[in-house]
Amino acid sequence: MNRFRMIVALALIYVIFAILLNSVGAVILQSIATFGIDKPQASNLELFKDLPIAVTALIVASFLPLLGYKRAMMISLAIVGAACIVMRLYPSFHMTELLFLCTGVGFALAKVSVYSSIGLLTRDAAEHARLTSTIEGMFMVGVLLCGWIFSAFIDDANPGNPVWFNVYWLLAAICFLVIVLLATSTLDESEAHSEATASIKGSLVEMGHLFLRPLVYVFLASAFLYVLIEQSFSTWLPTFNNEVLKLPHTMSIQLATILSGMTAIGRLAAGQVLRRLPWHVLLNVCVVGMCVLVVSVLPLARDVVARPDVGWFNAPVAAYLIPLIGLLMAPIYPVINSVVLSSLPKPAHAAMMGLIVIFSALGGTLGSRITATVFSKFDGIHAFYFSLVPMTLVLIALYFFKRETDRAGVGGPTHIKLATK
């Protein structure tokens, strides 16, 4: 088994899908300018992205070991690579919807396969946590690259200029290069098979058995709420920067990458902090910090006046402070994922990842839709204030999650010494 080549391939897959998935914020902003659509209609892109993720995960995740993880990853890249080419050749808003539909289908296949492959490439819980954190860190690198890649193809003087569609040639080329890397690598998938997952019926039964664990219920609630918050900010921050903070299109997208940069730093730092601080304490401090940040920073975004000479050194201070929420959001998702997956046998990882993907997709769709609706009827400031509601619910969910991990005897990231390198 080519372990190093496979790890590189997994990391690159996550970078590609991070760029495509998180481009929805930039594409919403550009679609409004290029196709003349309104915000609620533009928010449908989140729906076209997330619902296919949930449906695909529900249909294929439980018996993905039968297809093969490496084969599934190659199929996912081929789907999105082809969609990028079609998007460039026939640009329209409906084609944009199709692109995100294909991205959702591809990501469901890729995420379940990547996370399940991590279990095959690692020997113990500590190693699993290290590689999981590294792969998630690469995802945030992709998110960071996303804003800069897309902004490089946007004409500020004419935001609706269709030249920005050329970015899809680049993304298609990267997809097919990683397919070649996967095709020339090997992955031993024998441990992913068991008598329970040797058939489609057995695989579905395996997923059903997960619902017998109370820990799974509270985990899924926590993941759902976290993604709801994350997508609310990551999807609509470029539009918030443009319409509320009165920044140009290119700068709005570039400044939004600070959010992903802060998230990447937060996930790298969390591994070290968790060596000295219990995981549930860290996550609760982070959520409370998120609430404090929202309440204290959003008033600074009120009554901003457009300035023709605005730049990086004289932009509204809120443009730099709001993305700091990424630093506090960062540890939540990888920590709770690691706790749950480390508590399950490897043949059950695909089924568990299917459930994670489904609930994450639903949370992302709902979060973006709520933000779009409030943004459209009121303004961006009220839309971001609404995030205080799911943040409060996350605190409640984390309490029950900690209680269930204690009952199940799962040590969590502190016990398994979560690391990031």
Image (cartoon, helix red, strand yellow):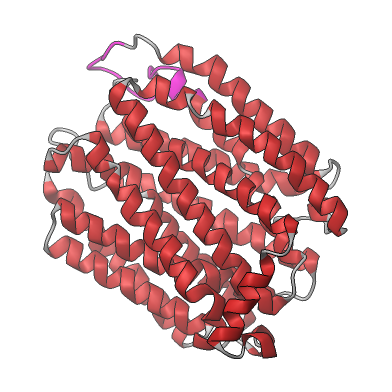
Q: Is residue 38 above or below residue 135?
A: above
Q: Position of residue 417 (x, y in %)?
A: 82, 56
Could you tell me what secondary structure mostly forms the magenta stretch?
Answer: loop
Q: Is residue 421 something that shows in the picture? A: no
Query: Residue at image x 28%, y 27%?
Result: 376
Query: Residue at image x 54%, y 70%?
Result: 112
Q: Position of residue 190 (x, y in %)?
A: 66, 90
**Image quarter of the C terminus:** bottom right
- Magenta stretch in the rendered image: 305-321
Q: Nearer the viewer, residue 193 or 267?
A: 193
Q: Nearer the viewer, residue 70 or 226?
A: 226
**Image quarter of the N terminus:** bottom right
Asked if residue 310 is among those painted magenta in the image, a careful observer would answer: yes
Q: Is residue 33 above or below residue 107?
A: above
Asked if residue 47 is among those painted magenta in the image, a careful observer would answer: no
Query: Residue at image x 83%, y 59%?
Result: 416
In the picture, residue 6 is in which quadrant? Answer: bottom right
Q: Position of residue 333 (x, y in %)?
A: 62, 49
Q: Nearer the viewer, residue 134 or 295?
A: 295
Q: Is residue 186 above or below residue 170?
A: below
Query: Residue at image x 84%, y 43%?
Result: 278
Q: Is residue 305 above or below residue 105?
A: above
Q: Position of residue 53 (x, y in %)?
A: 42, 62
Q: Is residue 233 something that shows in the picture? A: yes
In the picture, residue 88 is in which quadrant? Answer: bottom left
Q: Judge from the rendering whether residue 161 lies leftward or rightward of residue 5; answer left or right.
A: left
